[in-house]
Amino acid sequence: MSGTQDFANFVEDSADFIEVERYEFDEGSAYRFAFDRREFMKVFGGGIALIIPLSNAFAQEGRPPGGESGRGAASQRTPNEIGAWIHIDEDGGITVFTGKVEMGQNIRTSLAQAVAEELRVPVSMIRLVMGDTDLTPFDAGTFGSRTTPTMAPQLRKAAAAAREVLIDLAAQQWNVDRGSVRIVNARFVNHDTTKSLTFADVAKGQKLVKVIPENATTTPAKDWTIAGTSVPKVNGRDLVTGKHRYASDVKLPGMLYGKVVRPAGFNATLVSADTKAAEAMPGVTVVRDGNFIGVAAPDQQTATRAANAIAVDWKTPGQPSNAELFDLLRKPAAEGRGRGGEGGGGGSRPQGSIADGLAAADKKLEQTYTVAYIAHTPLEPRAAVAEWKDGKLTVWTGTQRPFGVRSELMEAFRLSEDKVRVIMPDTGSGYGGKHTGECAIEAARLARAAGKPVKLVWTREEEFTWAYFRPAGVIDIKSGVKNDGAITAWEFHNYNSGNSGIQSKYDIPNQNIQFHASQSPLRQGSYRGLAATANHFARETHIDELAHSLNLDPLAFRLKNIKDERMRAVLEAAAKTFGWGQTKLASGHGVGLACGFEKGGYLATCAEVAVERPQPKANDKGAMAGGKVKIVRVVEAFECGAVVNPVHLQNQIEGAITMAIGGAMFEAIQFENGKILNSRFSRYRVPRFSDAPAIEVVLVDRKDLPSAGAGETPIVGLAPAVGNAIFNATGVRLRSLPLVPKELTT
Amino acid sequence: MSKVTALNVNGKKLQVDADSETSLLSVLRNDLDLTGSKYGCGEGQCGACTVLLDGQPTRSCITAVGRAAGKQVTTIEGLEKDGRLHPVQEAFLKADAMQCAYCTSGMIMSGVALLNKNSRPSKEEIVRSMDGNVCRCGTYQRIVAAIELASGASKEVAK
């Protein structure tokens, strides 16, 4: 099984598996056709609908990165395609429809803030319908920190246009000049406030569909009164009382519980299965279809018993394990592999000449950095409830791509678009890990066979094993620097982990930065921040090494090589709050610094660690074995343009830093021959209360700049800052993530 | 296999019909439709399923329903009284101590159990007591602040 030949076969075969979610590949269909306005009012009955054409909504997208903007669907989108809409119904209810989804990043609140602002009403009057493929406009998915920079401004435009339409209608009702009508406290008032109308008064009897003009003007950030403030979560009460229904909480009449019989390893084929015992159980349906084998039963316990009663023989090819990982990743991918989205391979065009840059350098440095595969482990695992009714399939599922999952279902069951509906109840987090529809397809397959709705909730082990991972990677850096601190050469090769964050804000005359797609032995895909974590870890560790090689202060060294004002501002802000260079450190403590830029956000992170080592040994390669590292304090300065909700932004940044501790310190997927060895929380350590340092967030609010998303980028600074702090404390340089895997055993 | 036919949940005696070995979490969620308690790991490692059994914090995913028979079971749905939130629930809202909130029920139940035993825990005591509860969104310092707020140790959330 594990012979060399089998192994080689596996590698060859795996070249055929191009995972669509890899590097957030998100190409839409080539054509989408004009909508029919009459259709619209059929849905709503009456009131006023404000429609945002998609050409506006996604004008800023410019995907995919790497220079090929406007490829495929993006350039062929018709102006009549819809990005989002707002509906004011005849009783004055205001509903926003968007294909974006909520998974903890707080856009249900921040988008409501944007709309409330422009309509001059309290946030409580706004209802958001999100991620329901029958009700909301098409959306490629919620990823890439795109909601705040693209969806929020478009909803603002729609709301601003809605306000103007409503003011016109109010003015007509009173037969006065529209200039004398204002909205005050959610009521339309005339010039001397002697008359007033509610939203219901104005919308009653209307049947209006308006397309938002390109030039709709919105309130500038400096004049915001609702956005820019810390509005509490709009559905907070449902969340603290347990009332909110996640996909795994959905219950339908007559619903059965599903369970899938999983293969013995990856890439296995089903040879034979004895399902007699399971089929004999009352109420149990067994489905065997190709490589899929699963059961549906009246209750969860019976489903598990039935699945366990099926004797299955799988044929599993020999596959690589952790030990071979980094050698394997250096092998180039087969042709055609890694296409799409950000995984396109290559990199930027080289600048200058590396040879010249190295020749001009006083010091040269060449190092290799690695990152492990890690799992998202959203606390709510994949879950789906599927129901077939009159030939139409409806699935409630936790996903970042409801429309993508709809397409997967259409393909799996050969259904047309109108025969599939995907509903996404706000989910128990995603972090880039819920792009795919496996669980939805499995639940739907079981439901079709059983003739009843089926709920399927993946176990934690299934989520660890059958989802996908953050890509592992190898990064080689070769650099040169002059004694005065000027970096002269920068050659950077990233194998497999990806392109995100591969470019930096360092001003280096000679650069060659490349990404190389590899043959990943494990299924891999998006993870919060994508490869920006790996690329920042390697770059910012290397920068620290260069600074130390010249005996320069790491902050001063960075500032010497960075002209970008926004980057300098966050570096200076973080250093000031942290007291960089000011604090006297306790014995065994060290401090480290890192900075970065990605997806429109700038950050600088300072960390203080305490290292307990029984006997420090020089030249000790496994230096942290038996040692203990505690992150004591983190300061992160973050700038993403105009801040929309300070408390929620702060919460996102704190959360990203805390999540980053896992990948930085101890998270790593262990695998061997097609199996995951640590597919449980008891074997895969995630950050807990006792790991969380004191975190101080410094928000740099730039009201003069458009708001960028912030769900991802704050995660990238922690690992290098901590690695650099460990070096500062111990003199030991760690170049692999996780930094301290041995911590698991101490 | 013996059966459990009744459970005391949130002050009410409820009829059930479950094998005593079935997990308490499964009975609460699937039979009684009390879905506030969550499945997160099935091995008592994440705390999302935490309920109180006679006031003691209990991982309902690894607790056989037979063990809950005759005891008072309190779930997240039982904290609100006459439309008024429990102080720990209020404090979670004030401290914005959640993101996706899937861990929140378990966090709140664990926090309530801690405060019932120790009305003014120190920060270290909160961390030690809550360390078995996982928040993947990483809102730990806000949860600590919320519990301090509910204990009266702080009047408002710092910052």
Image (cartoon, rainbow, N blue to C red):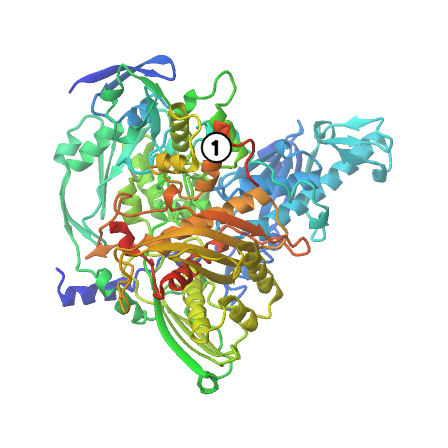
Where, by quadrant of the figure, is residue A4 drawn? bottom left
Q: Is residue B147 visible?
A: yes
Residue B31: x %, y % from top left: 32, 22
Residue drawn at x 84%, y 40% is A179
Instruction: Depth check: give the residue in front, A554 or A145.
Output: A554
User: As displayed, is residue A737 above or below residue B83?
Assistant: below
Q: Position of residue A462 (x, y in %)?
A: 28, 44
Task: List the single residue furthest toward the top.
Answer: B13
Judged from the image, the secondary structure of the residue bearing numbered disc 1 is helix
Quarter assignment of residue A257: top left
Within-10-Å neighbours for mark 1: few <14, some 14–19, many 20+: many
Which one is nearer the viewer's eye here, A329 or A682?
A682
Residue A254 appearing in the image: no
Looking at the figure, which quarter contains the N terminus of chain A? Answer: bottom left
Q: Position of residue A163 (x, y in %)?
A: 72, 39
The chain under label 1 reads B
Three-letter amino acid code at disc 1?
A: Glu
> Label 1 belongs to which residue?
B148
Q: Is residue A507 left or right of residue A740?
A: right
In the displayed structure, does residue A356 sit left or right of residue A36? left
Q: Position of residue A311 (x, y in %)?
A: 13, 41
Q: Is residue A738 above or below residue B115?
A: below
Q: Quadrant of residue A224?
A: top right
Residue ID at (52%, 40%): A130
**Relative to the observer, which residue lies in front, B111 or A532?**
B111
Classify A692 as above or below A94: below
What residue do we see at 51% from left, 44% from top?
A: A651
Left or right side of A637 for B62 = left
